[in-house]
Amino acid sequence: MSDAYIVGAGQSAFGSSPEETYRTLFREAYEAAAPADLDPDEVDEAFVGTLGVGGRQIGLAGPAVTEHVGLHGVPCTRVENACAASGYALRQAVMAVESGMADLVLAGGVEVMTDASADATKYWLGVSGETEWERMAGTTFAGVYAQMADAYLREYDAPRRALSAVAAKNHANGARNPKAHLGFECSVEDAETADVVADPLTLYHCCPTSDGAAAAFVASESVATSFDDRVRVAGVGAASDRVGLFQRDTYTAIPASESAAAAAYDRAGVADPRTDLDFAEVHDCFAIAELLAYEDLGVCGRGEAADLALDGATALDGDLPINTSGGLKAKGHPIGATGAGQAVEAFDQLTGRAGERQLDDPERGLAHSVGGSGGAAVVHVFEAEGVTGA
Amino acid sequence: MSAPEPGPGHADDRNDADARILGAGTYAPAARLPREAVVEAWGRSRARGIDAVAVPAPDEDVLTMGVAAAERALAAAGIDATDLAGLAFGTTTPPLAEEDLLPRLGAALGAPADARTHYAGRSTRAGTRALRAARDASAFPALVVAADAPRAPPNSAEGHGAGAGAVAVVLGPVSGTGAALVGDAEVSADYPGTRFRRAGGDDGGVERLGVTAYDRTAFTRPIVAAVGVLGDDADAFDPASAAALAVTAPDGDLPAHAARAIGIAPEAVSTPVNALGDVGAAAPLLGLAAALHDGVARTLVVGWGSGAGADALLVDGVAPVEGQVGDGVGDARELSYTAALRRRGEIASDDPPAGGGAAVSAPTWRRSIPARYRLRAGRCPACDALVFPPEGACPDCRALVDYESVRLPPAGVVETVTGVSPGGAPPEFARQAERGGDYAVAIVRFEREGARVSAPMQVADADPDSVASGDLVRAVFRRIYVQEGVIRYGRKALPAAEDGDR
């Protein structure tokens, strides 16, 4: 079995892009991801994640974008796992390479979320839980995470300020990311005093709806050697769960994340994520999700995430920087593109391309994507060239 | 010009009681628009004899109010809905101009599919007509529901007085105990123009010409005639012997005129028009429930409808009542005039664009109706776990089994909760939020025989800030949302703090 390597990754700017379409955004990501010397004829497979917000291209959304960028004839599969769609597309690419079925695979994702009226767009938000019951109780997507936040803050007697600390940190990182949707700083006080979206979550505790695309090229070992940059996929894990929060045994953890991380760590030989990892891109659609991720990924114990956030341990200069890209919070959250976008940040950090937010020679990083409120999760562990196991 | 004489009266030939009231239940919405707010808005209130009107919540209609009253009536009577043989509903304001309301009422309560059903509408006599129809069908026990929420142009007497309320009574055979229904009379008298709504899809509400003396005659004449016929029908009955007059009340003054014309003291009028406003077809039976609640031994029940005509019957004895309407409604929430207009949807935006990502088809929705209307859950035959909604593999033991259908108890506990603001509400709930403001959404835990299960529920009638984890709630029947004109109903969580007798 060949290991899988990312040999190129890139993304469009995330944001509101009224001049673009889902196809042109995907092209931007494709061109940013393509390594020099890429021969499109060598691409064996493609996997594209998208939810299809607004109802665009319900059928054949995958081939629609890969044909647009000239990958003519390449078999393309659309992957839909809500916000984890392109995290799973990347996993499909890794599986295709590891199985020996393909040597070079495109994994990507795209979403356009800002080109319809606000009222029309709302039909497409909050569609990834137990729709027939949660949505039809009047619950919004922010509402489901707010219910998790309410339960979490109550269970651990944690301060809401920890949520604001997450927001301020991710905005600080996003301000250093030229591709970020909300590339500006926000203070903890700003987040504390912003309008309430769904109590206890304020506006700054919530990610934006974004347009964007991201892509990565995944190669087998033999093919990867012909490219200049190689980031090894050291481990991958994924898990599903019941899609409704109310159907799960806990509201203060995302069990699918925990399972996915355990599988990825096992494969990558990560014993203690706090010390074995140098950074992590985690799914912070709402600030509470980042706190849950700290615990689900084993970065800290249950009930300790608030302190971790407040201590600054996960800031860019902390001992385990988290969401150096700005995260979903500041970089943006174009649903289908988000997971691939995390891989782009990992690739950039591990190949020294992260600009103002570049970490000091990181060796190992993680990307973590959650679909809905936890109905799907996927975790990848990436290693820089020359690193051999944790 | 003289008014036409009332037509020939009809006297039923049954002189003795032919059914009994086993119990009654009442319901009124939580919010009130006080008279002073109308005066502040318009300079005066044109609604005579009305101190406040009940204003339904955006997720309430005559069906939801009727179900609330019915559940109380069944509890008062000690009757299980599954034993009902008859169902009747009377209202002038059905949720839809066409489509039978009775199947939905029966499904909400869990009544048998083969119950005899009757619907009465198009006149404020609908409440007494429903009662008479259920009695005449002799399919007992029978549930009679009268619920109404009249609408009228905002600056009209009817608009100032438009209220809302519901009442239900459970009828049993004469051989049992309870208050006896004695006698039956009906009189018609052709008086056009005293209260009407135009035909057509989007009627503007109740109108009348406003000819004061004519209106009063159109009200009292058929009532007096019907009570006369009733006196002939019910042996040795003297109308003045009734200690309460439960009569239709288009406003707060007409009942007193009718009382005097019959020979009953105006103070004997038991219809809670003063506290709830014009409750249309629900008025006579709400008046009856108030009299039964107060232990009045004999009540004259008179339904009047424009057109005109009247029904009259006598209720002898007392029966248990749950819910209280009238002076007992002390903790009602007072609305400003603009809040009331907003709540009623008199000032509203265009509907949001139709269709989109989260649509639940009507067939899919229908399949879940037992769970939505009555909290039917499943019990796993393999491990006894509770499952809600009752479908798919058991969440505990993973067995893919057919669940035993069990009903969750109506009372639950809030596990976690947040608020949704009008600007953020899903489009399906945008109009509700516009009318009612912020609402809370919770996950509610129910327990049954030691097993627990949770359900996502909207919280009814409560400011989100007032709802917290650990709060006790009760599942109540409300509108959930409307899709393609089809009203979808289900259960919401009413905080125990909001769940007073009303």
Image (spheres, rainbow, N blue to C red):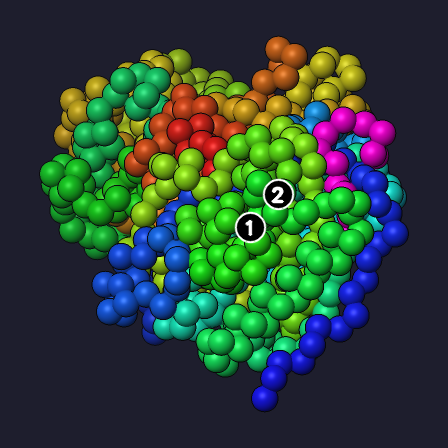
Q: What type is the residue that disc 2 sits on?
A: Ala
| Residue B175 relative to residue B282: left or right | right
Name which residue lies at 57% across and 43% down: B244
Q: CA distance from mark 1 to mark 2?
A: 8 Å
Residue at far top of view: B450
Q: Which residues are magenta?
A: B173-184
Q: Provide the chain ID for the residue under circle 2.
A: B
Where disc 1 sits, the SS reads loop
Of B196 and A390, which appears nearest the observer? Answer: B196
Name which residue lies at 20% across and 52% down: A183
Q: What type is the residue that disc 1 sits on?
A: Ile
CB of mark 1 within 8 Å of CB of mark 2?
Answer: yes
Q: Which residue is mark 1?
A: B264
- Callout 2 crowding tier (Cα within 10 Å): few <14, some 14–19, many ≥20: many
Counting labels gives 2
Residue B181 belongs to the span the image colors magenta? yes
Residue at far bottom of view: B1
Image-quadrant location for residue A158? top left
Residue A237, percent across and down?
52, 28
Residue B242: which disc? 2
* 1 and 2 marks on the same chain: yes
Task: Say which label, 1 or 2, has the lower sequence index.
Answer: 2
